[in-house]
């Protein structure tokens, strides 16, 4: 949202009833809508030129709710003639067949969430081909930054800001890829202005693969917390917690993403280096401030 507002766009945030306006950038129009109601969503996006479907639900609800929310976002975009942006990930590919995963990698998801995501993407891509909606489909690595981040990444920022140990799933010494949410937003804006990128999946790279432990070190260093203590939890802990937590049970099938390095191709025309990241280094563009880190962990 920040990047869109800075670029001069009017931004309307659609929140669930009771969601409130806290945490949104100044200048954001915030309205509430029932995202599970097609009529409510259609009404909420009237007169908008772009609809970014970024609503999420807990993993256990994916099979039932994700298709419903996507269908409602599609109906709303189609009704108002807006471009639909459906940010994605690499769930649709399943286990990687190669060191780098390009857009033409076979789509063979072996997980429930991968199959749900693939089915939704295929419906939206077909709608684009049929002329029923204009679709932009970026695929990102793990996103971090102010305003929200993945549950696997959040403990790193919380630990860095408090000087405490952080946890990390499965393998802290595997290569991984991350992208700052502002950089992800800038790439999305560029894709919106690139007609050739519409109607197909486009990989948006982060600044480059990095060993997860080194990423954690950069976060702690930027926060002034020194060398981090990283507590790695394995599949056994996943299974144990899953006995009591439906969320952990649902997340367990995605553990393969944290055990094996998965790189994404660079799409022609997209910048390889981000505008900002956690701190200066050979893989980054510039330093983040302590305030940015604090906002990232507390948002």
Image (spheres, rainbow, N blue to C red):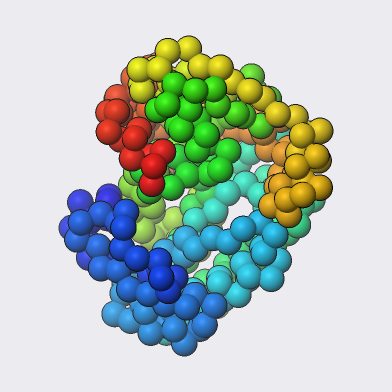
Q: Is residue 178 above or below residue 33?
A: above
Tell me if 48 is positioned left or right of 129 in this view: left
- Residue 95, percent from left and from top: 75, 41
At 77% from the left and 49% from the top, the residue drawn is: 244
Tell me if 271 is positioned left or right of 47 in this view: right
Question: How many discs mark residues in the rendered view?
Answer: 0
Q: Is residue 151 above or below residue 127?
A: above
Residue 162 in sight in this render: yes
Q: Is residue 190 above or below residue 219?
A: below
- Residue 279, percent from left and from top: 35, 23
Report the front residue among 47 and 289. 289
At 58% from the left and 38% from the top, the residue drawn is: 152
What is the quadrant of residue 201 in the picture? bottom right
At 66% from the left and 49% from the top, the residue drawn is: 91
At 70% from the left and 59% from the top, the residue drawn is: 60
Image quadrant for the N terminus? Answer: bottom left
Tell me if 184 is positioned left or right of 59 in this view: left
């Amino acid at each position: 949202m920040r990047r869109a507002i800075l670029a001069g766009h009017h931004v309307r945030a659609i929140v669930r009833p009771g969601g409130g306006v806290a945490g949104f950038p100044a200048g954001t129009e915030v309205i509430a809508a029932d995202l599970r109601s097609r009529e409510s969503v259609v009404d909420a996006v009237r007169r908008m030129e772009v609809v970014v479907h970024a609503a999420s639900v807990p993993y256990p609800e994916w099979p039932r709710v994700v298709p419903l929310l996507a269908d409602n976002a599609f109906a709303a975009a189609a009704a108002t003639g807006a471009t639909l942006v459906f940010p994605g990930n690499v769930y649709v590919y399943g286990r990687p067949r190669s060191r780098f995963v390009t857009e033409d990698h076979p789509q063979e998801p072996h997980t429930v969430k991968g199959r749900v995501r693939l089915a939704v993407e295929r419906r939206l891509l077909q709608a684009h081909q049929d002329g029923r909606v204009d679709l932009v489909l970026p695929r990102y690595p793990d996103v971090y930054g102010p305003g929200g981040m993945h549950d696997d990444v959040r403990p790193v920022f919380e630990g860095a800001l408090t000087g405490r140990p952080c946890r990390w799933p499965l393998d802290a010494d595997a290569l991984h890829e991350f992208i700052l949410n502002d950089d992800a937003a800038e790439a999305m804006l560029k894709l919106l202005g690139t007609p050739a990128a519409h109607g197909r999946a486009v990989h948006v790279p982060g600044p480059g693969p990095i060993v997860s432990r080194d990423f954690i070190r950069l976060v702690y260093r930027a926060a002034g917390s020194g060398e981090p203590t990283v507590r790695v939890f394995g599949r056994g802990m996943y299974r144990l917690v899953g006995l009591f937590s439906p969320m952990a049970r649902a997340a367990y099938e995605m553990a393969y993403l944290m055990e094996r390095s998965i790189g994404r191709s660079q799409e022609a025309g997209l910048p390889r280096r981000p505008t900002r990241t956690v701190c200066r280094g050979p893989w980054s563009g510039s330093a983040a401030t302590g305030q940015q880190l604090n906002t990232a962990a507390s948002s």
